[in-house]
């Protein structure tokens, strides 16, 4: 049992050499802080990616028509052409017959250009059904509504626009009730989608486009007004795409059914699309699991790298304590002469190293939390400075999430490091011969 006197002597020694004690703790402080910061950045990126993937619907399977490589090569040799590829109503019927899904929702790309007055952008409009709102977790801003089955039955010329379309065409007014054009067709806006977290970055790479630029209109209106051919004009030439169904959202009964259902969907699609050259299948749940595993591996790697600082800090403590043993030889001799045992000497030195590592660990925790919290607000500001903007190819948006386990583990490792690396100097100190120690200058 450590006596109060031993603790007092150990802490008094640290106080007498405050600057040296702080410099000794610096390795521990930086080691603990780096562990917390590394893990918080990794965890923040993980949560951001998981939200992006989950916003696609964890139980969804997205089947998308894509231009096959051979049609792209043909297009480069001709000034104008129409490439026919992708899914057909026959594929839709086959999936409904052989796949046990909760729902299968078609999307049909329409138009080549979206315009409002002088503002024109490339079309990213899709005909679909009201069921897409629930399947894709879409939310409409207050004051508007999503498509209804009545809109589909009437083939109504109405549309729901993404948040970025609203900001571009109607920056200072409410878009609901306003009109815009897709090619030469006039549509009335009945709702605006809330911003979707997949805008840009990982999300847009995942689905191939920024969903905040999407426009949704009734599937019946899309078939009636636009047909199957979408024309793209570029510098004196044009290319056309004849696609009957651009995407299918297939919803599994539960997350446990997603992977088996995706395999079944692939086998069914192989029947009409050998090699799936003109069809791609996106399974958010598989991506979700992949992100979790990758992030867990990265956290381990980052923590291992940051833990090197703790090792360096422990070696620093041992070196300083070994030097202290020589410096305090006479003090050790006096204590032994007045009755202190070897155990008392060992405990005194372990109190000092334990206090160094514990205090260093606490300061490291405060520093790590401070840096993690500050990164979210300070880094975007730094990267926005005129002299720095453009120097780094990275997003100014960074998310951190401090985890309890990283704080607890880093503190325990820091404390343990100090004690472990303090044992050897303590043993050396305790083995000093009292007579020789008293004669030491």
Image (cartoon, rainbow, N blue to C red):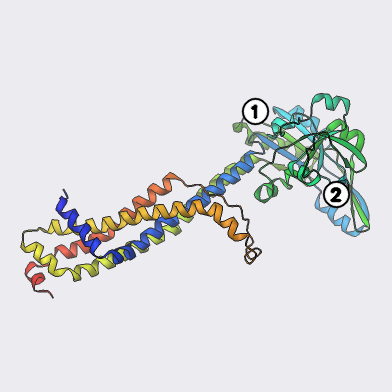
Label 1 and label 2: CA atoms lie apart by 43 Å
The answer to which of 100 and 248 lies nearer the viewer is: 248
At 9% from the left and 68% from the top, the residue drawn is: 433
Q: Pointer 1: residues within 10 angstroms few (<14), some, or many (20+)?
A: some
**Residue 324 appears left or right of 139:** left
- Percent position (x, y) of residue 387? 63, 67
Q: Earlier along the polypeptide chain: callout 1 or callout 2? A: 2
Q: Is residue 183 above or below residue 422?
A: above
Image coordinates of residue 301 in percent, x first then y, are 48, 55
Left or right, residue 42 beside residue 421: right
Element under disc 1? loop
Residue 258 sits above or below residue 25 on the image: above
Residue 253 numbered mark, or none: 1
Q: Residue 216 shows which numbered tag? A: none
Quadrant (top left, top right, bottom left, bottom right) of the C terminus: bottom left
Horizontal relation, residue 251 to residue 25: left or right: right
Q: Is residue 103 visible?
A: yes
Which residue is labeled 2 in the image? 119
Residue 318 lies, in percent from the top left, at 28, 64
Mark 1 or 2: in front is 2
Q: Nearer the viewer, residue 401 or 20?
A: 20
Expressed as whole percent of the image width and height from the top left, the position of residue 88 reads 84, 36
Q: Residue at x 70, y 30 (%)?
A: 134
**Can residue 298 be seen here?**
no
């Amino acid at each position: 049992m450590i006596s109060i006197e031993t603790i007092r002597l150990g802490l008094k020694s640290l106080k007498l050499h405050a600057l040296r004690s702080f410099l000794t703790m610096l390795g521990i402080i930086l080691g603990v802080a780096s562990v917390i910061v590394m893990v918080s950045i990794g965890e923040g990126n993980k949560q951001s990616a998981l939200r992006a993937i989950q916003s696609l619907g964890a139980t969804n399977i997205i089947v998308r028509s894509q231009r096959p490589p051979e049609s792209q090569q043909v297009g480069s040799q001709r000034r104008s052409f129409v490439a026919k590829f992708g899914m057909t109503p026959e594929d839709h019927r086959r999936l409904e017959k052989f796949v046990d899904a909760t729902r299968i929702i078609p999307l049909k790309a329409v138009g080549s250009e979206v315009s409002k007055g002088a503002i024109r952008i490339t079309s990213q409009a899709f005909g679909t059904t009201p069921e897409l709102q629930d399947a894709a977790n879409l939310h409409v801003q207050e004051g508007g509504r999503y498509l209804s089955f009545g809109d589909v039955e009437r083939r109504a010329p109405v549309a729901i626009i993404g948040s970025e379309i609203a900001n571009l065409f109607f920056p200072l007014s409410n878009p609901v009730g306003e009109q815009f054009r897709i090619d030469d067709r006039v549509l009335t806006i009945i709702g605006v989608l809330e911003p979707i977290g997949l805008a840009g970055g990982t999300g847009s790479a995942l689905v191939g486009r920024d969903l905040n630029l999407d426009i949704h209109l009734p599937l019946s209106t899309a078939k009636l007004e636009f047909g199957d051919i979408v024309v793209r004009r570029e510098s004196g030439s044009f290319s056309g795409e004849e696609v009957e169904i651009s995407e299918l959202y297939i919803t599994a009964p539960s997350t446990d059914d997603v992977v088996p259902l995706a395999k079944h969907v692939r086998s069914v699609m192989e029947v009409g699309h050998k090699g799936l050259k003109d069809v791609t299948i996106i399974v958010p749940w598989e991506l979700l699991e992949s992100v979790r595993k990758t992030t867990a591996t990265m956290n381990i790697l980052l923590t291992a790298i940051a833990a090197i600082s703790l090792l360096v800090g422990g070696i620093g403590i041992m070196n300083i304590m070994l030097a202290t043993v020589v410096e305090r030889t006479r003090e050790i001799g006096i204590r032994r002469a007045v009755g202190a045992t070897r155990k008392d000497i060992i405990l005194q030195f372990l109190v000092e190293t334990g206090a160094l590592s514990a205090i260093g660990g606490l300061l490291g925790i405060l520093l790590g939390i401070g840096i993690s919290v500050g990164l979210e607000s300070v880094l975007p500001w730094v990267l926005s400075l005129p002299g720095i903007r453009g120097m780094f190819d990275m997003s100014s948006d960074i998310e951190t999430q401090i985890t309890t386990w990283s704080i607890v583990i880093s503190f325990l490792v820091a404390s343990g490091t100090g004690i472990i690396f303090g044992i050897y100097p303590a043993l050396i100190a305790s083995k000093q011969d009292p007579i020789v120690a008293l004669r030491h200058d």
